[in-house]
Structures are given as C-alpha cells and as structure tokens.
Amino acid sequence: DSPIQGTPSWPRGTECMAKYNFKGTTEQDLPFNKGDVLTIIVVTKDPNWYKAKNTAGREGTIPANYVQKREGVKQGGKLSLMPWFHGKITREQAESLLIPPETGLFLVRESTNYPGDYTLCVSCDGKVEHYRIVYKEGQLSIDEDEFFENLMQLVEHYTKDADGLCTKLIKPKLEEGTVAAQDEFSRSGWALNRKELNIQQSIGKGEFGDVKVGDYRGTKVAVKCIKHDATAQAFIAEASVMTQLRHNNLVQLIGVIVEETGSLFIVSEYMAKGSLVDYLRSRGRTVIFGDCLLKFSLDVCEAMEYLEANNFVHRDLAARNVLVSDENIAKVSDFGLTKEASSNQDTAKLPIKWTSPEALREKKFSTKSDVWSYGILLWEIYSFGRVPYPRIPLKEVVPRVEKGYKMDAPDGCPEVVYEVMKQCWTLDPLVRPRFRVLREKLHHILAKELYL
Ligand code: AMP
C-alpha cells in the first residue's frame, strides 16, 4: 500500500484528503498525517508537487501522490449499504446471476417459498447453494445456532468464516445499477477512520437516531448515529448530497463512517447553539433584536441562493432545520429530502404548514416551493419560534391557503420584512420571486437599516 505514481492536475481550491503521513524534508514542505484535509492554493510547474494549506492555515509544498482529491459522491448509481441484496427474485434468476461460477460469489434474495424469510445464494465448485435465512423474533439465522440482528451482520459473519456453509462469502454479486456505499465514500475521499472519532454524550434526538457530540482529531463535531440498516440506507442519500455542497451557511459535512455491521455515522460541523427554533424560543424578544433576526434571515437566504444556483431543492426548509453556530451564524441542515431538481416524492410525510400549495397538490417541488417555505421560516423567525398558522386547525390550513389566505405579520415585525414574506406566499410559483431577488431585498433592508 505505497503511494502510486500519477500526474493529477487539480485547480486552486481543490480539497484533498491525505492517504499517507508526510513528514517533509525541507522548510518549504507542509507535513501532514493520513486523514488531514488540505486545500490546494498554488499549482506548481511540477505536477507532482502542489502548494497547499492545512485546516490550521499553515502553508507549504505537498506531494500530489500522497493525497486523494475529495469530490462529490456520484449521484448516478444507487448507493447501497447492501448492494448484494436483490429483493424478490426467483431461485432461477439468482442462479443465472451467479454465472459464470466463481466459488464464494454470493447474493441475498427474499425467499419466495417462505415470505418474510431470506435466502443466501452462494456459488461453490460450479453449483449454487441456497441457504434459507429464517427470521424469528426479530433475529436472523441460517443454522439456528448463530443469530444476527440484520443481513449485514449475517453477511459479515460468513465473510470471515464459512461456519458450516460450503464456502465463506468472498465476492458480492452487486444488484444492477447499485454501488457499494462504503466503496463510493472511500473513493471520493469522504470516509473517515472510526478509530479517530471519539463519540460522547447525546445532544439531540432525530427521527431515526441519536445526534451525539464527538471529537474527531481534536475538533468538536456532531455525529448522527444510525444503527438500523434500513434507516441507514435513507441517510446514505443525505450524506451523499452533502458531499456535493459547500457554503458557509450550510452545515458542513466532515465525513462518513460506514461499518460492516450496518451502523452509519455522519460527522458534521458542531453547531453549539442548537436549532434556530429552540434558540428563538428560549431567548425571546428581550434578548434578540431586529438586527439579529435580519441576520439569521439573510444567512438562510444566502444558503438557499446557493442551492438555487446549483439546482438543489431542499424540500424541508423550516426553523427546526436551521442550526446556530457558536458565532451566531445560522446554517441550513437536514438534507434528508434534498434532491437535485426535478425528482418526485411521496407527499405523505410532508410538513403541511411549510410546504407550498403546488407541491402538496401536484408534487411540484422546485426552488420556488423552497421559497414558499422560506416565507414561513421568516414568519417563524419574526415570531420568535411560534408554530405557523396559530389557532387554525391543521386540516383547514390548506383549503384556506389555496383561497389566498396569508398569515398576519408577527408582532413587531417591520413592514418591509412582512412584504417579503407575502411575496414568498404568492400562489403562482412562476410569479414568486427567486432567492437571488429575496437576498438583494434583504441586503437593502439591512444596508438602509429599514428594520429599525
Ligand atoms: P436532526 O435529526 O438533524 O433533526 O437533529 C436533531 C437535533 O440534534 C437538532 O434539533 C439539534 O438540536 C441537534 N443537532 C443536529 N445536528 C447538529 C449539529 N451539527 N450540531 C449541533 N447539534 C445538532
């Protein structure tokens, strides 16, 4: 595992992750350790050396072949934690997938004869063996001797040891169109080393797992810990979106750890002051003033302008999904539903009060539906974290909004800001302003001190 030769050519600003330790031999060299993140600042004439900067701001020369370029995880293939899982296919289809025979080539399918159970199919000396995996009281087992919590743990066990099977599992037969998530995060430079992450106390509960504070190589970080394999699969999508985005008002992804057992850790920058909605509610109008409210509004708007420019639709913009840093910078988080523009989605799980009428009605998600949500978020900010549409029963919200109803201005909200909210709530998405326009308006309000 020694450095390979190569002649990469990376532009200024390229981020790299160190693959090896580099001690340096001269004063000009920048020493680093495996796992360090470095940013290219000057491309030298010699393609084997770059001038780079580390996260502490120190600059120096680095050898190109000791580092790996960090790039956005590809969105083409479906990233999967279980790329060897083929779902409901027949015994015959499984056998044809395992051709040409190769001892140790395997896949897992849903059992056709025993619904709820699975079948492990392994190629062995030119034949395919089918082992029934029984699901009993929340556990999986082949031999009713060894039990596993999920398929990943089972596969991991038989990868290490045949333990009664005809062979140990050697090579997964990937489902067509899938890519092993572990491999893709490593390839793109986002996989972190579990040994360098120290997970500490819990700081929040998400819908699917704990958010904990941690220490990654001396930096305080937030760690989303997802234990269940099926849930982890959903979070893989979130993490892969985050690898493609970088903006000072988006919560920054630091990296991902995918364990063989199905646990997933998503490591991101630590936001000391928690969610914006809690921040506003707990402090209130005696502590937070107009300049601060406008600054939060602009922070979020700038993040959204960046997403707009890059064709990403957030779909779940709300004050609960904005976090506040130690320096009071508001950053957008929760990219769970974020997609590149133009994909469809199940409307059942949507937050009704934040979602635009056309998105609820026709699943038409666009940057313009994010603008609608942004208007609601502005209302949340200026009402210090109240729940939108107070005193209106949930099932009456949509019919009233469809008829043109708009919330009143929150108490003490400047008229100019209320005007911006109302523009966000324009029923016709084509007439609704873009984030770039909103950002210019808010800047104007800030510069002219119109919020006073
Ligand atoms: P989530 O599952 O992303 O909605 O997060 C649940 C809660 O965990 C949030 O409301 C925050 O209080 C906390 N949290 C999530 N991410 C971070 C972070 N990067 N820094 C600090 N706290 C966080």
Image (cartoon, rainbow, N blue to C red):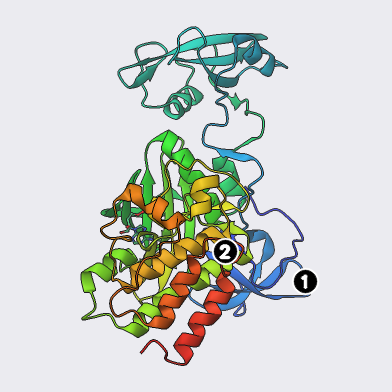
Mark 1 or mark 2, earlier in chain: 1
Q: Position of residue 83 (x, y in %)?
A: 57, 31
**Image mark for residue 307:** 2
Position above or below: 97 against 179: above
Task: State the quadrant of the C terminus.
Answer: bottom left
| Residue name at image x 43 percent, y 47 percent | 350
Q: Position of residue 135 (x, y in %)?
A: 38, 16
Number of numbered callouts drawn: 2
**Residue placed at 35% from the left, 60% from the top?**
320
> Along the line of sight, which residue is nearer the eye, 21 or 197?
197
Secondary element under disc 1, as helix, strand or loop, is loop
Three-letter code for the amino acid on which mark 2 is drawn: Leu
Q: Is residue 175 left or right of residue 389?
A: right
Q: Residues within 10 Å of mark 2 (few under 14, many from 20)?
A: many
Q: Residue furthest bottom?
A: 448
Q: Is residue 119 above or below residue 401?
A: above
Report whether 2 appears left or right of 414. Answer: right
Residue 103, placed above or below residue 416: above
* Relative depth, front residue between 326 and 185: 326
Q: Residue drawn 53% across and 52% down?
A: 358
* Cα–Cα span, label 1 and label 2: 36 Å
243 w.r.t. 130: above or below: below
**Mark 1 lies on residue:** 46
Instruction: Please state the quadrant of the image where ligand 1 appears.
Output: bottom left
Task: Indicate the quadrant where residue 404 lies.
Answer: bottom left
